[in-house]
Amino acid sequence: MEHLGPGVEDAGPRAARTGASRTSSTAARTAHDPALLVGWCVLVALAVALGRSTRAEGTEMSLVGPVAAVTYLGSLAARRRGWPAVLAVVGLGGAVSATTNLVLGAEPGVAAAFGAAHAVHGLVAAEAHVRLARRGRRPLRPAARPRFREPADLTALIASALAGSLASALVGPAALAVADGDPLLQTAGEWTLRNVASTVVLAGAVLALGDRAARRSAGRPPAARSLRRLPRGRHLGLGGLHLGAWLVYALVYVVWRDVPVSFVTLPLSLLLALRTTPAHAAVHSVVAGVVVVAGTHAGSGPFSMLDPGARVVVAQGFVAVAAGAAMALALYRRQRDELLAGLTRAQAAADDRADLLRRGFDDAPAGMALVDLARCPTSVLGGPPGGAAAGGAPPSSGGCARVRVVNASFGAFLDVAPAALAGTPVRELPAAHQGEGPCALEVVGAGDERSTCEHVTAGGRRGRLDVTRITPRHSRPYLLVSVEDITAQRHLELALRHQAEHDELTGLPGREVLTARLREAVDRGAAVGVLFVDLDGFKAVNDSAGHAAGDELLRVVAARLTAAVRPGDLVARFGGDEFAVLCRDVGSARALVAVGSRVVQLLEEPVALAGGSQSISASVGACTATGPDADADAVLRRADAAMYAAKRSGRGQVRLHGSGRLPAPRRPEQWRPEQRRSEQREPGAPLLGRASRG
């Protein structure tokens, strides 16, 4: 087997089948081309013969021109295969037309002129149809099937038929004027009207039926399917209406003679067009046209009283108007049905999306609410970005803004039934804004696009509100509010902050907390003082009774320190067996020393531990923060130096900084290991120092 290359091998069986199908289709089309051309020639000859059979006595002008419709359709079909095919079909059709006219008795010059006129008509009309379709919303590609689905398609058919008829009127009527001796302009007008009417009626029917078949093979739209599913009684009714209309046409144009009641038949055609499809309306127009032409040619009907020339004009004009109006109404009706079907589908899709959004809104885990701003004045709705004028507060929308709808999660957050919240003014909701800055509801209601804030409900729940402003094009704006319950998150943050700032063993604040509070008080110029407490004899208890007893002793010391100080004073553990007390509103150094004395007295009492009673004492250094040059770090250093002096002076006593000669403050390398480690921690690290193990 010959190697076909990697492109064919990689295409796979599907590509091979597709290529084979295209090849066989092309071969079949090529094989059938001669048969199609023969059939085309036979059809042109029959159309010419039919037209000549309707000639009035003494004239070459026939009452109908079916060959115009045939050449138009042939050229339009050949246009899908390119210009060479169009020229071949047009030339062959003209030759067959000329030959047939010659065989049926036309003079050679007239026959040749008719053949040329029919060729020109088909060529110009087909090209005009293609160009008009390209100017529409859906361009007609050269290889595309002509459409007959919208009123614009009927307009293209009429315009192209008129263009072809006018072009052919430059050739055929000249020969008729010579043969019959009629005026050239009158003959050209009759020729144009006849060809337009024949092309519109016959070609319109063929295009409508072809489009119907194509739509059936491609899948019928809902509007067409609805017609197909009509009840049997409805089909019978439409069939009876067709037969009744044709009988009336036959009565008026065949049976009666010289009775001018042609106006009776036109409403019947329009009524049928409003009840059926364009294909049915086109077929009805063909049958009605045949009846009108046959009766008029036989000398019957309301047009029989006219002379032969006028009879042709009036009959063709009536057929063209009746067929055009009927097909136009049918096309408009189908377009309306398809639009209604499309609207129904769009409405169903919109309802599905709305239901999906509604379910997503109702079942969302986050609380969601729509706030209506319809009652808010324009001054509130059209505020500047930022929600406030320069230097002012944002205009309030809390009084006019009302809750429109909420989901279950929003109601659960507020502990209120969702139905009870509908229509509630925003300012009356059981939740209050907390935090810096304005409320997000007020800011967005005043003009901002989006903002966030925190609210606390009456039950103590905390929520983060995300408010978005939505402004539809054809209605007033509203607010979309989503709330996230952050109560557990805030509790966790508080717990972590407490753990970071407090001693794990005693529960007292750490060194950083006391230092920060002292610095704030000094910056405010408040009268405060610091007690630096160091336990005497704690190492001996720790060594003799064990670490567990030492931990218990530190907890007892923390409790006694808290009991000894005044309300509002802050007790902190600095690390190991060292504590500090921040005394607020100290009026004098004497008052600070009095607090220190109570601390010493309470800590000297024996402590009952698991291993027995233990006694300790405390050395306390005191320092007040007074004067404009007071510094928090300096106060702490001085209190530490005073405590060191008290310990050197005999322990179990209070020493005020500045009373007598004090030793220099201890340097960090002289502190106990626990305190040194505490001082070497990074700023903000928790003080979780355990009892001294040394």
Image (cartoon, rainbow, N blue to C red):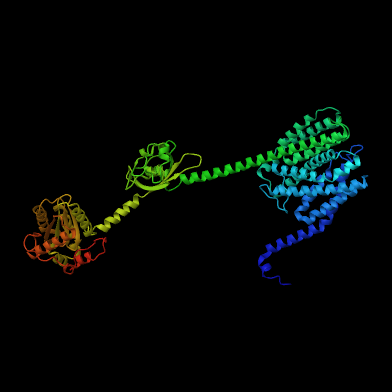
- In the drawing, does residue 232 fall left or right of residue 121? left
Q: Is residue 35 above or below residue 277?
A: below
- In the drawing, does residue 258 fall left or right of residue 450? right
Question: Furthest residue to the top?
Answer: 259
Report x, y in % for residue 481. Answer: 42, 45
Report x, y in % for residue 273. Answer: 73, 36
Which quadrant would residue 185 be assigned to in this image? top right
Q: Quadrant of the N terminus?
A: bottom right
Report x, y in % for residue 337. Answer: 66, 40
Q: Nearer the viewer, residue 612 or 505?
A: 505
Report x, y in % for residue 152. Answer: 69, 43
Q: How many marks?
A: 0
Residue 507, visible in the rendered structure: no
Residue 489, visible in the rendered structure: yes
Q: Is residue 564 above or below residue 52?
A: below
Q: Nearer the viewer, residue 348 or 481?
A: 481
Q: Nearer the viewer, residue 310 or 130?
A: 310
Residue drawn 41% across and 38% down? 379
- In the drawing, does residue 32 fall left or right of residue 625? right
- In the drawing, does residue 570 fall left or right of residue 163? left
Q: Quadrant of the C terminus?
A: bottom left
